[in-house]
Image (cartoon, helix red, strand yellow):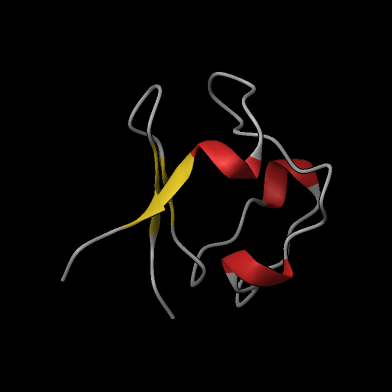
C-alpha cells in the first residue's frame, strides 16, 4: 500500500500505521479512509494529499 503525503504540511499517512488517534485502524488503505477524514496535523481534506513517490 502506498503512503500519501499532505501537500500542505508534509504529514505522511502510512497505511501500515493508520491513524489510531482518529479511529483509523492499521492496515487501512488511503483509498479506504472515510471521505470526511482530515489530516491530523493541519486539518485539510484527502484531496490535498499526493501519493508518495517510490
Nearest to the observer: residue 50 or residue 3: 50
Q: Quadrant of residue 1?
A: bottom left
Q: Quadrant of residue 7?
A: top left
Looking at the image, the residue that sits furthest to the left is 54
In the image, is 53 to the left or to the right of 2?
Answer: left
Which quadrant: the C terminus?
Answer: bottom left
Question: Which residue shows up at 47% across the image and 44% down it?
Answer: 49
Nearest to the observer: residue 22 or residue 50: 50
**In this view, 29 is above or below 22:** below
Question: Which residue shows up at 51% across the image and 63% down it?
Answer: 17
Pinpoint residue 43: horizontal percent, then vertical percent.
Answer: 64, 22
In the image, is 25 to the left or to the right of 44?
Answer: right
In the image, is 28 to the left or to the right of 5?
Answer: right
Pinpoint residue 10: horizontal percent, then vertical percent.
Answer: 33, 31
Pinpoint residue 32: horizontal percent, then vertical percent.
Answer: 72, 71
Looking at the image, the residue that sits furthest to the top is 42
**In this view, 38 is above or below 30:** above
Pinpoint residue 4: horizontal percent, then vertical percent.
Answer: 41, 55
Question: Which residue shows up at 69% across the image and 35% down it?
Answer: 38
**In this view, 32 is above or below 39:** below
Counting every numbered tag in the picture gives: 0
**In this view, 25 is above or below 7:** below
Amino acid at each position: 500500500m502506498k503512503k500519501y503525503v499532505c501537500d500542505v504540511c508534509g504529514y505522511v499517512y502510512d497505511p501500515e500505521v493508520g491513524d489510531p488517534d482518529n479511529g483509523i485502524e492499521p492496515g487501512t488503505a488511503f483509498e479506504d479512509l472515510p471521505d470526511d477524514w482530515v489530516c491530523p496535523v493541519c486539518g485539510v481534506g484527502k484531496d490535498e494529499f499526493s501519493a508518495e513517490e517510490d
